[in-house]
Image: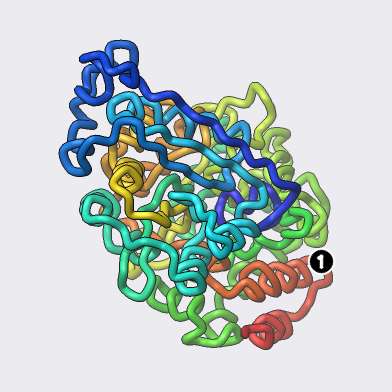
Amino acid sequence: MTLNRKRTGAAVVGCLAGLSLVLTACGDDGDDGGAATGGDDEGNGDCADYEKYTETYGDLDGTTVTVYSSIVTPEDQPHIDSWVPFEECTGIDVVGEFSKEFEAQLIVRVQSGSAPDIAYMPQPGLLQTVVRDTDAVVPAPAGVEANVDEFFGEDWRGYGSVDGTLYAAPLGANVKSFVWYSPSAFSEAGYEVPETWDDMIALSDQIVADGGKPWCAGIGSGDATGWPATDWMEDVMLREHGPDVYDQWYTHEIPFNSPEVADVLERVGSILKNEDYVNGGLGGVQSIASTTFQDGGLPIIDGNCFMHRQASFYQANWPEGTTVAEDGDVFAFYFPTITEEFGRPLLGGAEFVAAFDDRPEVQAVQEFLSSPEWANEKAKVSGPGWLSANTGLDISLLESPIDQLSAELFQDPEAVFRFDASDLMPGEVGAGTFWTEMTNWIANDKDNQAVLDAIESSWP
């Protein structure tokens, strides 16, 4: 599941929190230094990177583009700030509308004729649904296609496409293939960061032999309880059977109770259901189900466990004053590979920018949001916890060492990226039985085969 949905704990929560923020573009007074000439003196002072938009799309001064998103306060403000230089240099007014009811309201708005100009889609599955059910999404313009091909690559293009047509470029992204640990605790105990799965298991056994608990975990998340366990399945599927089988799994070309999926569940269970390994500082295996994902890794701080598999965005959950750095209180290492055959698999999530209108100003904004200029501007105004898979992103602009490491992984030519499978599966499964049955597997010690059979029987 993607970052925005997981951090709220459910796909749609709360009441409408729409917020319309109009950012005034410079140059509206018609002076020679305004947006139309790209000579803003009170903005960023240099509009050279933005001249291409007026050259391609014509005079954009005085136009307005609405952007609808599930990204709400306080995370909405950096997005608003990231648009400002573009607004000042093009004269486009970008109006942000931010709502916790985004997923419920988007299709309603489209069908009622009040679609936004642009929407940030939090999952490829939602993009596919809106494209196919409404026929209202506009194919991406040539500038977006060029940016996706140059700065994102084939995998990302596929996630933003429906039936072979590119509709949306990626926006922000997160990396899930991380194991959090304490560098100081590792150093004091003489442990080294594992580079392979076998190394990680050997380290876990050594920690047990030394009298410790190697792992801590929590899968609690309100109505969405269970999603962290699905991330374990996804990461291990990529490493044990590779990206091709991973794709067959989420598209149901192989059944959910196939031998390949059974292998993965057994391997995940060798850690999460191993009483010797878990749940450091929190209890036994069953405590994983009752522990929230926010609290799941905190025993690392107290020395009650040594490792916690969780995404890059988990950095926001460490207590105030915790130093997140390679030589700090906590850091993370890449979730190790099982076999070299499948390269360096990378599991993650992202939002995608889709448009419902092809006016020149809308296409200009859509192209800007797919560009390195936007990614770098967003990095300047964002704190820890944000990054992009755009290879034009200047990694040095990212504030957090974990974000920098994540961006390096995204830009690694050997990385094999796959989107969170539960977000790509039908809702009845990906945000339904996959969550609930993984919870039953932990909380009630439900049999492996029974868990897989139950999920398979729910596939529409």
In the displayed structure, would residue 124 be above or below residue 379?
Answer: below
Q: Could you say where residue 206 lies in the image, as x and y percent from the top left? A: 61, 52
In the displayed structure, would residue 409 be above or below residue 103?
Answer: above
Which of the pair 440/278 is nearer the observer? 440
* Left or right: 303 as drawn, with respect to 176: right
Question: Which residue: 82% across, 61% down?
Answer: 286
Do we see residue 416 in this rendering? Answer: no
Screen quadrant of the N terminus: bottom right
Which of the pair 375/450 is nearer the observer? 375
Give SS at disc 1. helix
Question: Which residue: 61% across, 67% down?
Answer: 268
Question: Which residue: 74% across, 53% down?
Answer: 221
Q: Which residue is identified by label 1?
A: 443
Screen quadrant of the C terminus: bottom right
Q: Could you say where residue 243 lies in the image, as x and y percent from the top left? A: 39, 71
- Outermost residue to the top: 41
Q: Could you say where residue 203 lies in the image, as x and y percent from the top left? A: 56, 52
Do we see residue 161 in this rendering? Answer: yes
Classify residue 59 by image quadrant.
top left
Q: Could you say where residue 150 lies in the image, as x and y percent from the top left? A: 21, 51
Question: Which residue: 76% across, 56% down?
Answer: 288
* Left or right: 253 as drawn, with respect to 161: right
